Amino acid sequence: MTTETSALTTAPAAGPPEDPKSPDVRSLFLAGPFIQLLDPATGEMPDGARAPFDLLIKHFEAQGISVHNAHRREAWGAQLMRPEQCTGLDQEEIRKADVFVAIPGFPPSPGTHIEVGWASAFDKPIVLLLERGREYTFLIQGLHTVATVEYVVYTDIAASLSAVDKAVHRAVTRHRAANRTA
């Protein structure tokens, strides 16, 4: 996928100045690749794989947002839950969250893609963080046609936190406006 893909570079609609903290976002589900990132020798996520999730969790929690995240809940792989436990828990946390944020993964994470589908089916505002220069599935690229989605194309997540905040704001604001008129 290139950054020229129109669906992923659409400018935000004109409107009031954006304050990422203005929408009433109390909870967020942060999804991303997990099992495929575990080190086979230790069974845990290496620091480099863990870093973007840890950074985003700390960033959102510093804003007073409760972050639900399987990576942290399962001690970055040290305390993996059984499929029968984590599946229902993840689905329920997505259902209750005000907004869904995901790193779809490269190569694509099957679990994350299922969670993206749940978020879409539950009509959640969605923010997808896409690494610049990577190819993503057509359904990720076209999700904005059936759900409220904001894309953030990044090179460095730490340098993109402001863009992530603005995308959360836009997604939540657009979603709430659409539901008021529906």
Image: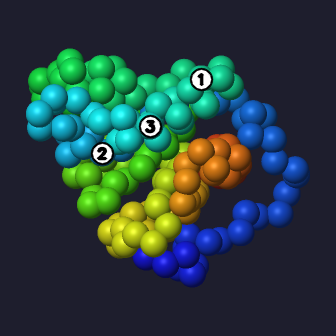
x, y (%) of residue 11? Answer: 71, 69
Is residue 90 found left or right of 24 in the rendered image?
left
> What colour scheme has been applied to the protein in the rendered image?
rainbow
x, y (%) of residue 60? Answer: 60, 30
Residue 47: which quarter of the image? top left
- Where is mark 3, residue-wise? 51
Residue 89: which quarter of the image? top left
Would you place residue 6 above or below residue 151 in this image?
A: below
Amino acid type, callout 2: Pro
Number of numbered markers: 3
Would you place residue 11 above or below residue 179 in this image?
A: below
Is residue 87 found left or right of 168 in the rendered image?
left
Q: Nearer the viewer, mark 2 or mark 3?
A: 3
- Circles 2 and 1, Cβ within 8 Å, touching? The answer is no
Instruction: Answer few, some or many: residues within 10 Å of disc 2's Cα (few below 14, many 20 plus, some between 14 and 19).
Output: many
For label 2, the SS is: loop
Residue at the spot x=21%, y=38% of the render?
38
Residue at the spot x=37%, y=49% of the render?
116
Marker disc for residue 61: 1
Is residue 51 found left or right of 113 in the rendered image?
right
Foreground residue, 28 or 43?
Answer: 43
x, y (%) of residue 87? Answer: 21, 31
Q: Nearer the viewer, mark 1 or mark 3?
A: 3
> What is the distance, in whole Å, between disc 1 and disc 3 at their CAs?
15 Å
Residue at the spot x=55%, y=75% of the render?
3
> What is the distance, in whole Å, between disc 2 and disc 1 at their CAs?
21 Å
For label 3, the SS is: helix
> What is the distance, in whole Å, between disc 2 and disc 3 at their CAs?
13 Å
Foreground residue, 111 or 38?
Answer: 38
